Amino acid sequence: MSTPPLSAPITAPTTATNAAPAEPALRLASPTRPAAQALATRAALTNTPPAAWMLGAVAWGLGWGVLLLADTRLALANQALLLVLAGALAALWLPAPAALVAALLAVAAFNWTCVPPRGTFAVDSPQNALLLAAMAGVLAVLVAVVARLRAQARAAQQHQQQAEQLRQLGDVLRQAGDPLTHAGSVQQALATLMGSPATLLLRRDGQGLPTPDATLLLGEANADELAGLWHALRQCQAMGPGCGHHTELPCWYLPLRGGGAASPGVALLRLPLAGRDNPPLRDHAQALCDQLGQALQRQFSALAEAQAQAQAHTQAVRNALLAAISHDYRTPLATILGAASSLADQAERLDPAQRRRLADSIVQEVTQLSRMTDNTLQLARLDAPGVVLRLDWESAEEIIGTVLHRARRRAPERKLRARLEPGLPLLRCDALLLNQLLDNLVDNALKHTADDVPVELLVRREGQQLVLAVRDRGPGVPAAWRERIFDAFQRGDAPPDAPLRPGSGVGLAVCRAIARAHGGELRLRPRSHGGSSFECSLPLADTAPPPAAPEAQA
Amino acid sequence: MLVEDDRALRQTLGDALRVEGFEVHTAASLAEAQALAHHRQPEIVLLDLGLPDGDGASLLASLRAPRAGHASPPVLVISAREADAAKIALLDAGADDYLVKPFSIGELLARMRVALRHRGTRLAPAVTRYTQGDLVVDLAAHQVLRAGAPVHLTPTEFKLLARLVRSAGQVVTHRALLADVWGAEHTEQTHYLRLYMGQLRAKLEADPAEPQRLLTEPGVGYRLIDADLQA
């Protein structure tokens, strides 16, 4: 997102017109005060544009021109009024000190040229002396009033500009994804405001105490200033002239206040007049800082909330996992322990057929446990970030062959059929994972199908995908469960007394995880005449198929 | 010799093997196994991966080191994980076969029998004839018969089949097959194998989609099922 330009630079309010009337006793000792006032006066003079000087000079020139042209035809009092008018006009443009000096000079010149006896500074009558004194007094008052009005107008305009700048900054920061990307604009705005470089120390996260690793320093700072920045950040307090803490410092350390207990950052601002407070300037700087502070705090809150949610989710998954393990694992373990302890304690009293049955049940339950362990481990592995698949070119025919071979060994009496489209391309996949996926699906299908009903494996090509389907004619899955059965350890809203489907906790979840790890998907489609079809679609590699195998050298 | 660090499994396997008439020596660590192999000259070694004191490969190397008067015993690798790179590395380095935990005693005995028989035939004149059901492969005569009728194989198909026949009953890794049939520079081209195994199955299997002879060991290699015993 591009940064809209923040509003035009706002110059510091001139201290000459805004001088604080009463200074707290704290700062009376400031040795720089007279020098500072002289500096402010000079600033007021140099900040006045040439056009304003011209207009002031023209006003005086016109006043003197009319006066001299109509010299003898006008009464002395009228002449004086003409000059007062010229002085008032000039005060509209000239800076106050210049206007005052010009007015006093004009009174002196008027005395020299027009007040009898002419050509001297002497005044012949008390009436004329009163006229000159009144003239000087009125001019001084006029200059003061006009200067004050001008200062007020300027302050109002400045306030409006500052408000607009804050509004724009607030908008930018609210829309920004990461407020840190806009910290530079805030720094720039502060530097322009202060007329000297600003330094920001910002936290990257809102957790715990600030550490150097988790902060960002924008701008330059010497060792003392750095120490000041860290102190202000840790204490979350403003320091410097007028801030109530460490007022002896030459600059301001303003915390970025965001509403939280800790401040998300702190700004170092170098004052144009070292060590001298300027409340309106400080208020505006603080407002700018707070805009950034609030944006940062908002981001910290959002991050903390997301983390809390992720943690809650992890916790929920872990609880479900523990609940499922405690059930899914305890049941076969109970059978095994029962059978094994019976063999150990009662072996001589059991007939060979009974011993055989016990041993068989141990083998069967251990096989089930082993499968469950494989699935749980695989699910955990695939859930972890940065899973590496052992990809190779594999033939679907071969994978199906292995799956059938294993299924027949486990359930020799069951009917299994496989149908493969001829001429299927090789598949880029992890053969072990794909075998596990199909093993689980076939097991699942056999579990939910009557013994004499066949389970089918189908492989076909659909555009740029290979579809491996395992279809059964079992009872099917209710519509409400069709997505949920793929969640790990979900058993849906089955009534608590409903018989749990053995091993349904993790098998399908790992199947879907395997399909997705290959960039594919596993879906369940109900079949039109009953039963389910679990369809795994895998993308065929868009990389060029490997070159045909050459005949080996004889 | 049984090398396994888990006491319960070591005892169970030991008992089961003694019942079958084997004389069993057990070792719980690599160091123990090295010493035992030196003193006892085992006829077959069951080697568990993940021993407390090191890599099974070093034991394999010392077993395979030529020693006057002693044949190098067959080695069966026992691994806890199906996708175990160490297991495949050992197979490529000359181990005879592998088993993934958990396995049944029946499976273990069958693998041991195959391994022992091969060790015998390796010293005797090399196997030249393989018979399994209606399939007869005569390596010397370059002839393959299925249900009495000759089957035409391309030279590569025959070479691949012959390699599997020489290790019938045992797993042969992708790497070993590629190196022996196509040459050492083609050991990564597993897709050659997919293609030629498909062709071989089409010619030698009743249902190529469900092979009974040329079995796939996913992620590891291929296994041609053991020849009929009377052959």
Image (cartoon, coloured by chain):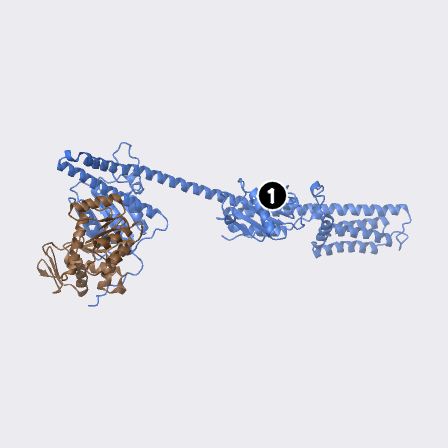
Q: Which chain is brown?
A: B
Relative horizontal placement of residue A213, taking residue B125 as reference (left or right): right
Closer to us: A304 or B135: B135
Task: Answer whether residue A397 is visible to the viewer in this image.
Answer: no
Query: Is A247 above or below relative to A112?
Result: above
Closer to us: A114 or A15: A15
Across and down, in percent, residue B117 comes to 15, 55
Relative horizontal placement of residue A270, taking residue A442 as reference (left or right): right
Across and down, in percent, residue A5 comes to 56, 53
Across and down, in percent, residue A271 comes to 65, 49
Read off the residue under disc 1.
A238
Q: What's the colour of chain A in the image?
A: blue
Q: Count the marks.
A: 1
> Which type of secondary structure does the marked residue at label 1 adopt?
loop
User: Which residue is at 17% across, 63% downward?
Assistant: B158
Query: Is A261 above or below relative to A74?
Result: above
> Callout 1: residue from which chain?
A
Closer to us: B224 or A56: B224
Label 1 neighbour load within 10 Å: few <14, some 14-19, many 20+: many
What is the quadrant of the C terminus of chain A in the image?
bottom left
Relative horizontal placement of residue A296, taking residue A66 as reference (left or right): left
Task: Answer whether residue A80 is visible to the viewer in this image.
Answer: yes
Across and down, in percent, residue B72 comes to 21, 58
Residue lying at the far top in this picture: please name it.
A497
Residue lying at the far left in this picture: please name it.
B148
Query: Is A377 above or below relative to B39?
Result: above
Query: Is B34 above or below relative to A494?
Result: below
Closer to us: A55 or A161: A161
Looking at the rendered structure, the kind of residue marked 1 is Ala
